[in-house]
Amino acid sequence: MSEIIDYYSKFDEWGRLDREPLEYKVNMHFIRQNMPKSGKVLDNGAGPGKYAMELAKLGYRMTLTDLTPRLVEIAQAKADELELSPQFDRFLVRDARLLEGIPTEHFDAALMMGPLYHLQDEASRIQAVQELRRVTKTGGVVFVAVRSRIRKLLTALMFPEQWKPLHTMEAIMEFKETGTFNHADQGRFTGAYFFPLAEIEPFFESHGFETIELISSSGIGAGLTPAQWDYWRSRGEEERVLRLIYESASDPSILGFGSHLLYIGRKMQ
């Protein structure tokens, strides 16, 4: 966990979502669509709290947790800056696998938009999902981000020198079997886990969730360049493009090629 804390203490996660706005827009579209009309919401592994701030603006009572103390401090400062602090019940430094001090069946909905990327052993992933289930009310909705293994394979084939040790076919074939990745270059993206597409829904369903939807957080818009977005904006049609991306986000033909996927599920009895 110390590697993850070191990485995110230096990384600008709020800025990443500003630089890659499509992921945030698509995720927020589906979060709004599936949220209860009101209630208590947990943003677990929230980073600097970009999603939490938006939900606070919508009137939800928020609790924010993250493993990295600096990010929790940034989130608190953001809430003050945006005059949203009254909507937050707590800002907590917590490991997603052990949400100490948070009551069982407490939240009407819960987000976990990052922790599963970094939990490379199955026991840890199960622990995190079980903790998310514990603190969510029966019938409550969860939103969990995961990474696609097939997309990572494509990325490694396209840019092998950027994603060492996935710059040899031997390493790529090993990754295909395990889904675990540790960057060879010091200071780059931390150790991560990538799911096979076919295992995502069964994983959550085996731990007490009913699947509502699995979507690509970029959909068919993944390859659009800034210049291409400028073209659609110049025509006044950006919103129509976004609607098309939302409508096709769960299309099975594109799910595996999404860099980030969003699992939406409901806690069963």
Image (cartoon, rainbow, N blue to C red):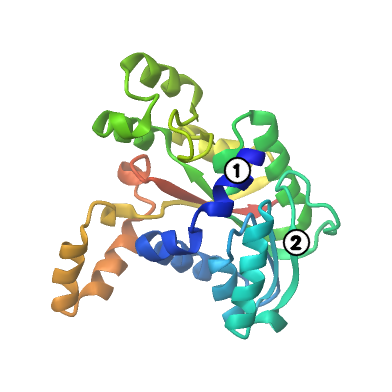
Left or right: residue 138 compared with residue 263: right
- Mark 1 burial class by Cα count in 10 Å: few <14, some 14-19, many 20+: some
Residue 228: % across, % down: 16, 63
- Mark 2 burial class by Cα count in 10 Å: few <14, some 14-19, many 20+: many
Q: Are marks 2 and 1 in contact (CB under 8 Å)?
A: no
Residue 76: % across, % down: 66, 72
Q: Is residue 43 visible?
A: no
Residue at 69% x, 43% y: name it: 128
Q: Is residue 230 above or below residue 16?
A: below
Residue at 71% x, 51% y: name it: 132
Residue 7: % across, % down: 55, 46
Residue at 22% x, 57% y: name it: 224
Between circles 2 and 1, the one closer to the viewer is 1
Residue kind at label 1, given as amino acid type: Ile
User: Seen from this angle, which residue lies furthest top?
Assistant: 170
Q: Is residue 45 above or below residue 186?
A: below
Which residue is more in the foreground, 1 or 219?
A: 1
Which residue is more in the foreground, 8 or 176?
A: 8
- Of labels 2 and 1, earlier in sequence is 1
Tell me the quarter of the picture where residue 247 sits: bottom left
Q: Is residue 204 visible?
A: yes
User: Mark 2 falls on what kind of element?
Assistant: strand
Residue kind at label 2, given as amino acid type: Leu
Residue 251: % across, % down: 34, 49
User: Mark 1 falls on what kind of element?
Assistant: helix
Residue at the spot of label 1? 4
The disc label shown at residue 92, or none: 2
Q: Tell me how far mark 2 sits from mark 1, CA to CA.
A: 17 Å
The disc label shown at residue 155, or none: none
Which residue is more in the foreground, 164 or 107?
A: 164
User: Seen from this angle, which residue lies furthest bottom?
Assistant: 83
Q: Is residue 243 above or below residue 130?
A: below
